[in-house]
Each structure stands twice: as C-alpha cells, then as structure tokens.
Image (spheres, rainbow, N blue to C red):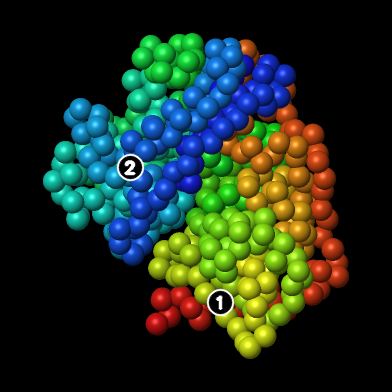
Amino acid sequence: MFLGIDIGTSGVKAVVLDEHGTVVAQSTAALTVQRPQPLWSEQDPEAWWSATTAAVQAIPPAVRRAVRGVGIAGQMHGATLLGADDAPLRPAILWNDGRSFAECEALEQAAPGLRRISGNIAMPGFTAPKLLWVRDHEPALFAATRTVLLPKDYVRLRMTGEKASDMSDAAGTLWLDTGARAWSEELLAATGLTLDHMPRVVEGTDITGTLRDAVAELWGVPAVPVVGGAGDNAAGAAGVGVVQDGDALLSLGTSGVIFVATDGFRPNPARAVHAFCHCLPGLWHQMSVHLSAAACIDWVARLTGAAGAADLFARAEAAGPASGPELFLPYLSGERTPHNDAEVRGAFLRLDNDTTPEKLAQSVLEGVAFALGDGLDVLREAGTQVERLSVIGGGARSRYWGETLAAALGVELVYLKGGEVGPALGAARLAQLAVDGGTPAEVCAAPPVSHSIAPDPELVDRLAPKRAAFRDAYPRITPRNH
C-alpha cells in the first residue's frame, strides 16, 4: 500500500493505493483561508499539520498499517518562513495572494536574468516576490528567517525532520534554474537570500527521509520512506498518466490549470505561460494558470442560495447554454494567464431585468470556460499542440459543465475513472515508483476512460459571440486602465 497526501488550499486529502494502483481508501480534512486585508491570502502552517493528521487517521487502521511508502503533493508557491527553531514566524502567504505586485517589478529589475533562468515572468503568486514584500514591510521577520519552505515541504519537515523540495514545486518559487534543475544563487541574491535559506532539491521519486517514530505512532503507519513528491499540478498529472511529451490535462480545482508535459524546457514568459520542471526526471511542463475555477462555483452557489455545487450545476442546466446576455469574468483573486494582473477582480456584466439565479449560474460556468480558453490560446501561440485534455479535480464531476468547456476550448475532454482523486493519487504513485521501482509509463499509467466529450459544433457557434464579448471585456474592467 502507498499513501498519497495532498496539502490543498481548501483541505488535505489522503489516498491509499494498493500495488495494482487501485484506490482502496481516501479521506479529507477541511482547511480555511484567512484574508485579513484586501489582496491577502494566508493560512496557519499548524493547520496543515493538524488537517494532515486528521486525514490520515480517518483511513481505516488496517489499511494504514499496510502502508510501505508516502508521497506528498501540495498547493504551490506558498511562502512559509521559519526561524532558527524551525517554527513558523508568521502565517504562510499563499499562491493566490496578490499583495506583492509592486515587488514583482522590483524583482525583474534586480534580476535581469529572471525570465531566462526561471522561464517565468514575476507574478505576485510566486514565492520570491512574497519574500521581497516581507523584507520591505516586515523587516524584523525577514531578518529572523532562516529557512523558506513551500507548504507541502513544511509538512515533510514535520513528518521526517528533513528539509527538501522536489523540482516541480521548487520551480514555482522563481529561485530555481529550471533548465538546470538547481537553485540559482543569482535569483536568490536578488531577494536577499542564499542557498542556506533553501531546502535541498530532489526529484519527485527520490526518498527524502522516513517518518519519525512519533509521527508513525500518531498516524498508525509504519516508519516508512517519504519521497520528494510534487507540486499539486505535477502530481495531478502523474496521477492520470500525463508523463510523456505532449500529454495534457485540465485541472478543475480551486484554480484552473491546463498542463502539458514536455521533454525539454520551453519557456514563454511574455504571455504569462508557466514553464516548470515535472515531478519525474528528464521532464518539464508548460501551464496556463487561472486563479479561480471551481472556486467560482462555490462562490456563486453561496451568492444565489444554492445548496452546493451539484445544485448550482442543476440550476445552470435549467437555464441552458448561452441562455442570456450575462457575462461573468472569473477574476475573483486576480488572474495569471494570459493577463498577469493581480489587481483585476471578477465582474458580472450585461445583467438585465430577465436575469435569474439560473442564468447567473450558467454565466459563471461559461466565464470560467472562456478564461480557460484564453489560456489554451496562449499555449497554442507558443507552438504547443493540444487536441485532447484529461480532466481532473472536483469540477470533473459535472458532465454538463464539460459540454460547455469542450465547446469553449475546442478540444476533446477525456474523463478518467478516479480522475477526481487528484494530486494525492499522483503522490502515492511517486511513492510506489521509489519503493517498488518500475517505469513512469508503467506505474503512472492513465486510469480507464469513463467517458469523453467532443466539442458540439452547434454549441461552439452559440457560445462564439459570448466568448468574443468576454475577450473584449477584460480591458474595460482592469484597474490598469483606470
């Protein structure tokens, strides 16, 4: 048995696979996000540890006792600042925090080689600008910082006592020489840091330590190896077999991601495409990233009094696609690809006297789909060919939404059995690779196909005018133009 743990934004998920790759148990423990000021998004690292313990302890005891390896995945980019005693100095600043937009410009000026070395444009979501913000606004805490860890790697420290990060997660800091798969002293120096502040970097299948005896006893798990693991998107890709050049997925979690595996480092920072290492040796990937996807579903469900996501989808289906003029711009936390705009915020446009909660629900499904379509267009501009996408994440449960997504993206969507398990599945597979051996193609094979959705030409035509209006709307609402 192999345990995969995903430190998400809204919860920690634990999954156990058997040696045949079958999910035998899974559980989730909830997390909350604190937003003490506009643009801020934070979590207490102790909450990650408590939720991880709760999620693991919810797995049946007999299954836990059979675990032979642990893999960890997690939300990327979060800045966890530790002092000399390895205790957090402040709440972690998360991936969807937008406070450091001014520091991004400062970082680009301080490190002219940033885009060439990291392969990415400076964005507030990345880790490095957050440290510049702390240096400028909380100088005493910055001076006291001895180690900077990503969220899953703080949990690793608690699990094993080891400070390590895998290549895919480390690439999201802006401190990694992504092509060379090593920390860049030049980029670290631009934020006043050195190699001493960093954990060691490893491949996702490297063993980084073993569970501490006290943790093993607390969890009811043997003192087994813990592997490097992955950032959430790379782990999700490993979980659904996106492990060869050209394989691609669509992740519909809190954020929305289109992920394409590549056999080389192919950056395109000018259009806010992310170029990171994959969690497997010798592989990289490109991503278009959208800060709000399924998060918009939960938000509009609360706004309209829907009982939850399933009720919201039912209401949207009752209205039908392109049923009204309503437009939704899904920038509730700003946006990355293709706009790189931390200050823009979501909007409903073209509401009228006939607007109903059902039409609002439908416009949200369309708005997220249109934003993802913008991201896919940018990948195509960079020369990436995508004809089909494997769909993972909580949003994969809705076939109705899938029809809208397929039409907006113009590609076939492939839904995999167990695909909704997400990054924890890939983390467990990385543990299996480390402990039992085998090749990524064998261990990280795609799950069986549940169903697929091809673009409906009639729906493509019906949505086309609204998608054009969506593209025209962004310049009108961004603070950059006011």
376 or 230, which is in the foreground? Answer: 230
Mark 1 surroundings: few (<14), some (14-19) or many (≥20) residues within 10 A: some
What amino acid is labelled 2 in the image?
Asp
27 or 166, which is in the foreground? Answer: 27
Q: Which mark is residue 279?
A: none
Tell me which label, 1 or 2, sits earlier in the chain.
Answer: 2
Residue 321 on image: x %, y %: 76, 70
Q: Is residue 129 above or below residue 342?
A: above
Which of the 4 image quadrants contains residue 235?
top right
Instruction: Look at mark 2 in the image and give the residue it sits on.
Output: 44
Instruction: Say whether residue 159 is visible.
Output: yes
- Left or right, residue 137 beside residue 394: left
41 or 216, which is in the foreground? Answer: 216
Going 13% across and 46% down the picture, which residue do you hit?
Answer: 140
Instruction: Look at mark 1 in the image and give the residue it sits on.
Output: 348
Q: For the N terminus, give its image quadrant.
A: top right
Instruction: Say whether residue 376 is visible.
Output: no
- Left or right, residue 220 beside residue 407: left
What amino acid is labelled 1 in the image?
Phe
Going 40% across and 82% down the picture, which residue do you hit?
Answer: 482
Looking at the rendered structure, the secondary structure element under dot 2 is: loop
Going 70% across and 49% down the picture, which residue do you hit?
Answer: 397
Residue 385 on image: x %, y %: 72, 52
Going 41% across and 64% down the picture, which residue do you hit?
Answer: 342
Which of the 4 image quadrants contains residue 380?
bottom right
Residue 271 on image: x %, y %: 53, 61
Residue 382 on image: x %, y %: 62, 56
Mark 2 surroundings: few (<14), some (14-19) or many (≥20) residues within 10 A: some
